[in-house]
Image (cartoon, rainbow, N blue to C red):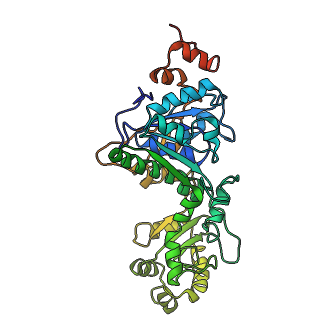
Amino acid sequence: MLPSSSPSDAASGPLHGIRVVELAGIGPAPFGGMLLADLGATVIRVDRPGARQAGNPLEPSLDLLARGRRSVTLDLKSPAGLAALLRLVDGADALIEGFRPGVAERLGFGPDVCLERNPRLVFGRMTGWGQTGPVAPRAGHDINYIALAGALDPIGHAGGPPVVPLNLVGDFGGGGMLLAFGVVAALLEARGSGRGQVVDAAIVDGAALLTTILHAMRAQGIWTDSRGENLLDGGAHFYGVYECADGRHVSIGSIEPQFYRRLLELLDLAGDPMFVDGHRDPAAWPELRSRLEVLFRSRTQREWCDLLADEDTCFAPVLSMGEAPDHPHNRARGTFGTVDGVVQPAPAPRFSRSGEMPLRKPPRPGEHTREVLAEAGLTAAEIDELVGDQVPGRVSG
């Protein structure tokens, strides 16, 4: 069975006591596993034999999405490796995998096999296109999923092409976070029903879900398919990014009237009828944006911070990833942390009673193979036969 806790884990976090087996991958599924581990679940990551996960450009010691787990290496194409995985599944509350549809079944650990052994198991499946549908068997990446979901087209400037929003909207927001949410929801349901189930988390579904408010605005006639001309896509002069005199940028989000009025006061524009009346007049937004572009280029980012940062204008400087951890607000909240000299975002959200997990470094692939398999009930001889020379230090006795 899967061990209930790691010797190095503190008894904290709202998911403490939840046991998860994660089949190693790249991108969204590891992010989902990271979220579960960050919130206190015991997550055992099953890596392939070898130093690095296929397709992963990161050195294992810097693969932050793998933090907080213990790692075992198993060759799932071998009978012994598959048998060891199923022993781990026997004692797990959940399993998560990010293979294409049908791969887990071909390898011998599909939902039917696992749920027959462990009827309470939540089987989390992370794919781009989902388990069903005409495109389900095809390869893809974040950019493809958000394109088909209608989440890519609205992002960008007027008259220009769609702008790729890194892989935040698909892999992580619409993918790994949806997977973790679905797994936790299914675990809650299993407590009452005593039955597990399959969670089909598809990035195309999650990315579409993130656009819900845009569909509502479109139905109301206050959102068009013209990129860069709407309330939240940079079309509004009071909601966007402006370049400063030093080449840095600031963000303005003064949507509500009271915040917009205060912004105009601080910019000495409260007496300008065009700005006063143009808050809800999309036809005036392009000219007003052009005027604000000139104004914001008249001072440096620091000067705009001195004027606006302590006011209710919905303002913030645009910080680089290197600068963000040092901002006073982020430092006060502990939004970022450091482990072995590597800066990274801290677990979130915060909980008032159940505690927080500390930041923990990623494991080396196979670092905990012997101890985890021993805790799962395999004998020393079985472990020696299974891992051979893959992990240093043979088991004796």
Q: Residue furthest top?
A: 397
Query: Residue shown at 46%/21% (left/top)?
Result: 377
Q: Is residue 342 visible?
A: no
Between residue 164 and residue 324, name the one nearer to us.
164
Relative to 214, 137 lies left or right: right
**Relative image position of residue 101 (x, y in whole percent):** 63, 48
Between residue 164 and residue 313, name the one nearer to us.
164
Between residue 155 and residue 48, name the one nearer to us.
48
Q: Is residue 329 visible?
A: yes
**Relative image position of residue 194 (x, y in whole percent):** 36, 43
In the picture, residue 9 is in which quadrant?
A: top left
In the picture, residue 287 is in which quadrant?
A: bottom right
Q: How many numbered dots are placed on residues in this image?
A: 0
Q: Residue furthest left?
A: 353
Between residue 108 and residue 335, name the one nearer to us.
108
Relative to 157, 29 lies left or right: left
Query: Residue shown at 60%/47% (left/top)?
Result: 27
Residue 252 sits above or below residue 119 on the image: below
**Image quarter in which the N terminus is found:** top left
**Relative image position of residue 299 (x, y in whole percent):** 56, 71
Residue 1 sits above or below residue 262 on the image: above
Query: Residue shown at 56%/65% (left/top)?
Result: 208
**Relative image position of residue 226 (x, y in whole percent):** 64, 79
Relative to 260, 170 lies left or right: right
Relative to 61, 38 lies left or right: left
